[in-house]
Image: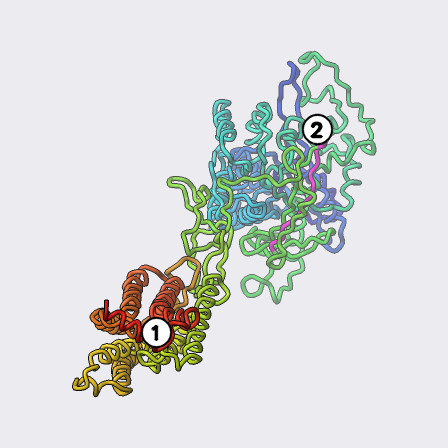
Amino acid sequence: MREELVQDEEEDENMQDNAATGDVKLSNMAKLQDNQEYFYRFIIEPYQNLQATVFAITEVNQNPHILPNFTLGFKMFDSCLSEVKALGGVFWMLTGAEKEVPNYRCQKSQSQLSGFIGDYQSNTAVPMARVLGLYRYPQISHGSTIEMLSDKRQFPSYMRTVPNDKFQYPVLTRLIKHFGWNWIGIIASDNEYGVLGSQNLKKTLANSGVCVDYLKILPLSSLKAQRLQIIEIIKKSTVSVIVIYSTRMEIMPLMEEIAEQNVTDKNWMATTSWIVSPVFSNKQSWRTLNGTFGLAIRRGKIPGLSEFIHSLHPSSSPDDIFVRSFWEYAFGCYWPTDNNTLKLQDVNATYMLCTGEEKMDNYDLTKFNLYDFRYGYNSYKAAYAIAHGLNDMLLCNSSSGPFVNKSCANIRDFKPWQLLHYVKNVFFKTSDGDEVLFDINGDPPAIYDILNWQASPDGNTSKYVHIGHYDSHAPSGQDIFINESLNLWQGGSSKVPRSVCSESCNPGTRKAVRRGEPICCFDCIPCSKGEISNQTDASNCFRCPDMQWPNEIQDMCIQKLLDFLSYEEALGAGLTGSAVALSIITASTFCTFVKHRDTPIVKANNRELSYLILVFLFLCFLCPLVFIGKPTEPNCLLRQTGFGMLFSLCVSGILAKTIIVVIAFKATNPYSNLRKYVGYRTPCYIVSIGTLIQVTICIIWLTISPPFPDMNMKLEEGKIILQCKEGSEIMFYCMLGYLGLLASVCFVVAFLARALPDSFNETKFISFSMIVFVSVWLSFIPAYISTTGKYMVAVEIFAIMASGAGILICIFFPKCYIILMRPDLNTRGQLLGSTNVSKKK
């Protein structure tokens, strides 16, 4: 439907006298078949839009502040959704004659053609805009939303009171994202609205990470086979939310087929073109489309319109060519002489005749106001916009006009482009408080209502529930609002449906896109060792910092455990206890020797060396206490060097004892040269030289590359191994090698002296102790190399205690046994007697 506004100079001229009745109907009558009966269906929405426009013109004419002394009239033409008829109507109005002649204007009256309101559909608004743009006639649409009409190079005189579709794509995308959907289907009509809109929506969805499983275009002349093919795709797809980007009439056959096949497991998302369409007002559609939600053109209130509708009557509105059809629709009767009604003989039914006595007061205006005057409200604003443009032209000050030399247009004889300038720049508020203005592209601010289609439990009625809104002028973050407590989905469920290709990947995993499929279809792969993902649907995992490690489910980094041989753990406590126990035993042995220092068994084989060896053994058994605990720089320096020097002192003392025994038995001859080596100097030299070499090795080691504390983060997962690095491994093994050399020399000397008299001879025991000592340390090296962390430290502690215990047991325990258990053997005479007996044997 399209209206042409005209203005006349005479104030008292009746508006309806200027209305062209014409012979084309607005009602868009449709012939349907039902049980062999035919009838015409009156679609009320275009008539609603027309009445809203007429009411706006009536208000303007009655308003002394807008166009005083001027009266607005209108002509109307029904395009019947046809581009050809729409262009014919444009030329009919531009020509002013019955014959449509381009570039010709027949001025039969004083009326001035002002502008055009319409068309409602995009497919007819576009060709209209191309023609009217040539003449720069203002054209304001109250229903066409396609984005291309904002291109002022193609459509310089086009404006609209409904939002541009460029706002609809991101709002639909935000709604889809809001409900957590990323797997969507799209069905579009095969026209500019559907094809362009669906492609732009798909692009916007892709930029937001939402995948489209299918985009199907409905041909305008779709056959049932084509519809069934699309329905089969809908059924097989895992998509549960489908966006219908189509004009209302094109989608109707498909939705009827879907209703017949009882497809009720899908949720439908509607665009502004059909969310409140009357073509789906039947029970079958209610059952299928229950839960549908989407965007709707903002509704508005038109005060006084209900009274205006109540005043309609065929007799009082003879120039309204559609009022009789509306009367039939409103009261369910027919005018027997009306050519738009079937004759009685064509049907086998009885119809109630219209008498004209029916009262509009009894008519339920909620039927007329079923859609809250959304498009009617915008046609109402469009009429006011042209009226305000004319009024601004009328009020132009001749000294400050917008045209050449600051001139103004003559309202009685203006050019279309002059009025276009004023209409583009109008700004006013409706009686409902709604602001009306156009941006540089002729678009108004984008304001949408978010509606939810909810059917009653019995399926007899349905309603549109306002669950939210969108306002492009609102601050960021406040531009969209949804009251989810009011929203219901397919089947009346309040639970938000799921529509995803793959369920979300939990933290600790990452997405791995399936080859050949959209990015929304993926598998969830656990993060690799040492990596985490701390958010849902992570594309990548990342490594934890060096000091941290993933927790069990790999969704966060936690502090790595510090691993070292501590006193608190069982191994550390056991080794500490063993070291202390051996130290106490050694100290007790020392005390026993001191207490019985004057006995022959103690005095034999150099009592002072025995004391010295016991003291060094005591310190050796305390060495493990330096190895246990958190490694620090001081104890790392003391560990190996301290143990090496103490054992060097100990083994050097044993070597000195062995050599003194040999010298003592070899120097029994008064004339022997070895007698001069018997005394305190020889053992002091041996111990000092043996220890000095080890000290030199340790000093070189500490100078070149000393041991240092180290944190090994790669040795064991989830742990930081605190350890003392040897620094120079060569020097470490030199220190051990020197200990082995001392022990070997001691063993050889003791082994060679094993045949000396038993009573004063310790060489057998020293031999055994050195065998134990060397065996322990030879076993230590491969064990030490093959272990890591605290177990490496434990191996070394065990070697220290085992080798020390071997010396203590083999050398000193036999003497302690005699001292404590067999004191009868601890006499000089007994020792000498034993010697004599041995000689006799």
Specify the quadrant of the image occupied by residue 827.
bottom left
Name the spot of residue 445 as percent of width and height, x first.
Answer: 61, 53
Tell me, yes or no, if residue 391 can be seen here: yes
Mark 2 and mark 1: Cα distance apart in space: 122 Å
Check residue 795 in the rendering and tell me which mark sits there, or answer none.
none
Q: Residues within 10 Å of mark 1 (few under 14, many from 20)?
A: some
Q: Nearer the viewer, mark 2 or mark 1?
A: 1
Name the spot of residue 108 as percent of width and height, x first.
Answer: 62, 41
Q: Residue at x 43, y 72 (%)?
A: 583
Locate residue 289 relative to residue 768 in the image: left or right.
Answer: right
Q: Is residue 220 magenta?
A: no
> Does residue 704 lie above or below 287 as drawn?
below
481 or 692: which is nearer to us? 692
Mark sitting earlier along the chain (2/1): 2
Tell me, yes or no, if residue 103 can be seen here: no
Which residues lie in the magenta part? 456-472
144 or 69: which is nearer to us? 144
Q: Residue at x 50, y 26 (%)?
A: 227
- Report the residue marked by disc 1: 830
> Does residue 240 lie above or below 570 as drawn?
above
> Does residue 582 lie above or below 415 as drawn?
below
> Does residue 448 lie above or below 607 as drawn?
above
Disc 1 marks a residue whose amino acid type is Gln
Q: Secondary structure at mark 1?
A: helix
Q: Secondary structure at mark 2?
A: loop
Specify the quadrant of the image occupied by residue 118.
top right
Disc 2 marks a residue whose amino acid type is Gly
- Report the residue marked by disc 2: 459
Name the spot of residue 679 as percent of width and height, x first.
Answer: 27, 86
